[in-house]
Image (cartoon, rainbow, N blue to C red):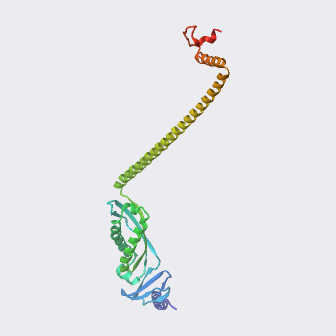
Amino acid sequence: MNPKSLIVFAIPALVIIGVLFGSVFVVQQTQQTLVLEFGKLVRVIKSPGLYFKIPFIQDVRSYDTRILDFDLSSIAATLADQKRLLVDTFARYRIVDPTLFYRTVFNETGAEQRLRILNQSIALGVLGKVTLTDVLSPKREAISKDIRNQMNVAAKAFGIEVVDLQLRRTDLPAQNSEAIFNRMISERNQEAQEFRSQGDEIAQEIKATADKERTIILAEANKQSEIIRGQGDAYVTEKAAKIYGKDPQFYDFYRSLNAYKAALKDDTTTFILSPKESFFKYMHR
């Protein structure tokens, strides 16, 4: 077979192969596919498998059936308490109506642009009704859910379901951060001072109670001491009276010795008395 004959057979063969390849397409497990004819939708395929189309006339466009995620743009929101806040959000969505998706946003890039616009509008509205304390508290989850629900309703117009949305990061603008941190420090210092004042007050109460109890205990002890001393003196007086009754002269002598001992216990003590003074009567004997 000469070269000219090979060319004659090769060209039709290549055309046939091209037509065959152009008429077959595969839909994957994770895909949903639209068949378009001159840009007009003629078929929607959601089951995986091998399919045919008219080559050069029909075209296919496939979309992912899995959940897709992307970062939404940061937005600067003014909260209900007039605080400024920079908010970063993270969203997850899936394409539930490929026909509507194709007609409204065309592809994932167009979908994400629309979702960013929706997020900015809806998030600003929701955040404008809450305070900074709400955003930084467990209420944050409810705020995220509110934004997601409103976005999901709006996204249905594009054949999209918003599965999840989270406020991933919330930052204060630089010009507000220092003032708020200083205020927080001042509030903590004030609380600490209040705790110290309360502690001092409690300490004073405890001390006053202790002093009162000490005074009562000492008074009771002194009272008991006086009672015991009185009982002792009475006992001594009683015994002395008995001794005096038996030997008055010895008792008088004994009392004089005790008086000498008490009066002369200090070596520097000097008495100037008449020798005839009764105080020294036992010293003359």
Figure label count = 0
Query: What residue do we see at 42% from left, 65% from top?
Result: 140
Q: Quadrant of residue 136?
A: bottom left
- Percent across and percent down for residue 78 are 32, 62
Which residue is at the far front? 245
Q: Is residue 163 above or below residue 39?
A: above
- Percent across and percent down for residue 73 are 37, 67
Query: What residue do we see at 37% from left, 83% from top?
Result: 100
Does any portion of residue 167 appear in the rendered image? no
Does any portion of residue 140 appear in the rendered image? yes
Image quadrant containing the C terminus: top right
On the rendered structure, is 251 left or right of 104?
Answer: right
Which residue is at the far right? 246
Query: What residue do we see at 60% from left, 11% from top?
Result: 280
- Percent across and percent down for residue 210 are 51, 41
In front of the other: 21 or 213: 213
- Percent across and percent down for residue 252 are 63, 18
In front of the other: 23 or 162: 162
On the rendered structure, is 220 left or right of 243?
Answer: left
